Image (cartoon, rainbow, N blue to C red):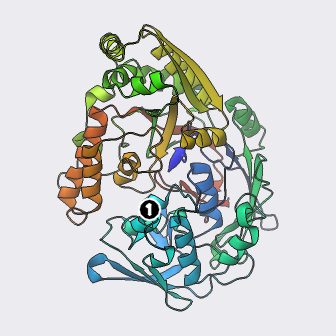
Amino acid sequence: MNFKTAAKVTVVAGASVLFLAACGSSKSSSSSSKQTANWTESAELPTMDISKSTDVVSSNALNNTNEGLYRLGKNGKVTPGIAKSTKVTNGGKTYTFTLRKNAKWSNGDKVTAKDFVYGWQRTVNPKTASQYAYLYSGIKNADAIVNGKKPVSSLGIKADGDYKLTVTLDKPIAYFDKLMGFVNFFPQNEKVVKKYGSKYGTSSKAMVYNGPYKMTGWTGTNLSWTLKKNNDYWDKKNVKMDSIKYQVVKDASTGLNLFNSNKVDFTTLSNEQVKNYKNDKNYLVRKTASTFYVEFNRDDSNATLAKAFKNKKIRQALSLAINRKSYVNNTLGNGSTVSKGYVSEDLAENPKTGKDFTSDAAVPSAVEYNLTKAKKLWKEGMKEIGESKLSIKLLSDDTDGAKKSTEFIQGAWEKLPGLTVSNQNVPFKTRLQRSQSGNFDTVISAWNADFTDPISFLSLFTSDNSYNNGKYDSAAYDSAVKKAEGADSNNKSARWADMVAAEKQLMNDQGVIPIYQQASATLTRSNLKGIIYNTAGSQYNLKYMSVK
């Protein structure tokens, strides 16, 4: 997910440049008082449109206000959602879901199989322009629909009455059950979508909810909103919180002051703050299945820069110039670790040996620091493109952490002769828009895995993926990913080898520059219990949260 956040990760990327974490605040409650909490986000909420959500902030909000066939539970395990039972037949290519009859939308409508059919068809419809439509690949006719070659009605999903849903796949999908807990597969109420039209999901009022909470107070542009208990939710008896109030806090000092004055129960700490709070009872480090990386725009409107970014030696030089260890320890200092590659560590293990994916797919030269080698390759690359000087803009978010990141990389890159770097720190939503439209030279992006499988990372950089903002193009890479998702999908060892090959190809090409795997050092009020946190997918499941 697009970390592309302040992922991206939303947020990301899911997504962003400094992963946007969530937070909670509450005062102790007696039996006569309401269960309330105050929660913080480090970036604005871009959208509540299920088909268009791409980032961590939106994903967390949707995950707690809506629900799909499954819900992502503890340790990334799927738990029952709207589906009360599932039958798998036809060699893993047909799924039949029986839906619970007491599921309702917050407007009183029943949640039916037709809501899933409509929501899925809307997401794959090219007119919707969903960046997550590619996740439907493998569902019957999805690829052809996305490419405009078949009608949306041909998608492999069918409602047999109100409470029976049948999904047909072109091929078995190893991680299909995990996808069913992901927000872009949630149902959508056709009546509500059509009622609001282009305004759907752009404010809390232009939306309807079938999950534990419903949202109020979000106008689409403001920096605060509230989640209130949804009394129409089928499992409302297990929802203890009456309300969770959110506010966007981009500055770590402000967040700490709010926490210490008991105005919020969660805040993300800066490097300087960590030193003083490591022994605090509220101190908690959250690791994410995320990678923050620099992406090059090979289709840059500046022809000279486009030529430069297509030069492998220049890309390698820019990577080698970054002292990641110094950056992680001295600039971040929050528990984040140096990236071992593009795919994050502790995400998946070799089905035969149990070795971490990052060990099997390691290309050490793609993430090492060697300024001498960087200068040599830079000189050679600049000669090859016939230039002596370059001026590059580096795009990122406008959070305190993101600004520190761009300053560090700027300082590292300007050690290369003839290179000038200017930083562009903009609001998270703007950075996402500019990344997606190709309006950048280089950008610090982030990806948080949507599910616990390397393909969640690797599919991003196929030549036809909507998230491939820098237009990386490699036939060998495309082939390896295609085999992992197709011919080898039922062969665990062969599929693993395909994904390793793809990762090595990307890193040997220096297709992107991995920087670090994010962890967030936080203060989380110790009286908040029942918070389910996952490193991949929607990070926070607050259904069972309570104040003790």
Q: Position of residue 300 (x, y in %)?
A: 49, 31
Residue drawn at (48%, 38%) of the image: 518
Q: Position of residue 119 (x, y in %)?
A: 57, 72
Which quarter of the rendering shows the C terminus? bottom right
Q: Is residue 322 visible?
A: yes
Q: Amino acid at mark 1?
A: Asn
Horizontal side, residue 187 vs residue 380: left or right: right
Q: Name the quadrant containing residue 523.
A: top right
Q: Is residue 42 visible?
A: no
Taking depth in this image into account, of 216 and 153 the one nearest to the observer is 153
Q: Position of residue 270 (x, y in %)?
A: 60, 29
Residue drawn at (80%, 54%) of the image: 219
Count of numbered tags? 1
- Compared with 527, 374 (above or below) is above
- Compared with 199, 436 (above or below) is above
Q: Which residue is mark 1?
A: 147
Q: Name the quadrant containing residue 177.
A: bottom left
Q: Name the quadrant containing residue 397.
A: top right
Taking depth in this image into account, of 177 and 431 the one nearest to the observer is 431
Q: Position of residue 370 (x, y in %)?
A: 32, 16
Residue drawn at (30%, 35%) of the image: 507
